[in-house]
Amino acid sequence: DTAVSQTPKYLVTQMGNDKSIKCEQNLGHDTMYWYKQDSKKFLKIMFSYNNKELIINETVPNRFSPKSPDKAHLNLHINSLELGDSAVYFCASSPTRRGQSTEAFFGQGTRLTVV
Amino acid sequence: AQTVTQSQPEMSVQEAETVTLSCTYDTSESDYYLFWYKQPPSRQMILVIRQEAYKQQNATENRFSVNFQKAAKSFSLKISDSQLGDAAMYFCAYRSQVTGTASKLTFGTGTRLQVTL
């Protein structure tokens, strides 16, 4: 009965390929995110969606394109993968209290390795 | 922009002892949330504890408690009766609660906690 689930957990691919990571949450939250954790464990926001609308788009190469078909799903598609894209990608969702998002609930992460 | 600083890259504690992890943050806002997340080797991000800035009382969750000093912009995590399962990376995080802003979690760089026998 996973709250935030993302697939796949591991992804090994060659440079230049296109890949997608899928995320689904069954918590009924309005807001979903993609975070990237680099090799030094630093976590940084990439994108945030609220009710399928993009609300945060940090400085991310346009090879990364999020898609939210409905508020329970937020997928991440990456074109022309580069070695530097190797990282752990986390999907997360947040409930809303007093009109604002609060804590984030994270998926188990997808370790992407580009070779 | 808000920043979160964790000045202890690594900490070690003996089982059953108490350890305190430090976190400071910089913001000009008055309404925000602070969090501590735990990331064990499984890499799952687990919420440990949450503090709302407008609440003066320090949050507690079983063996975990915080020392929230709003004026000093300090938010330390105390783990009492440490257990082997507490070994993990611990991240401090900040989220703005300013109405009308699209908020995000801003993380510190993490503290790796080792628990020894």
Image (cartoon, helix red, strand yellow):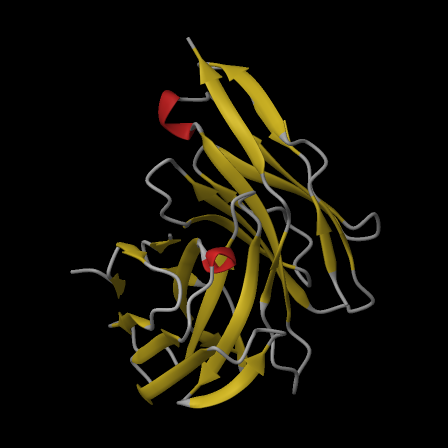
Query: Which one is in front, B108 or A94?
Result: B108
Side of A8 where A85 appears, left or right: right
Instruction: State whether residue A93 is above or below residue B63.
Output: below
Point out residue B79 in the picture as x, y percentages from the top left corner.
52, 29
Which residue is at a point 57% across and 60% down the rendered structure image? A44
Point out residue A93 in the picture as x, y percentages from the top left corner.
40, 70
Query: Which one is in front, A84 or B21?
Result: A84
Q: Quadrant of the N terminus of chain A?
A: bottom left
Whether residue A70 appears in this view of the structure is: no
Which residue is at a point 59% across and 41% down the rendered structure image? B110
Query: Which one is in front, A21 or B44?
Result: A21
Q: Residue furthest left?
A: A1
Instruction: State whether residue B73 is above or below residue A90.
Output: above
Residue A110 falls in image quadrant: bottom left
Side of A105 where B9 appears, left or right: right
Whether residue B86 appears in this view of the structure is: yes
Side of A104 where B31 appears, left or right: right
Residue B33 falls in image quadrant: bottom right
Which residue is at a point 41% across and 89% down the rendered structure image? A51
Instruction: State whether residue A107 is above or below residue B110.
Output: below
Q: Residue furthest top?
A: B117
Point out residue B50 in the picture as x, y percentages from the top left corner.
53, 53
Which residue is at a point 61% across and 81% down the rendered structure image? B102
Q: How many marks?
A: 0
Side of A114 where A43 appears, left or right: right
Point out residue A23 in the picture as x, y percentages from the top left corner.
29, 71
Instruction: State whether residue A112 is above or below residue B89.
Output: below
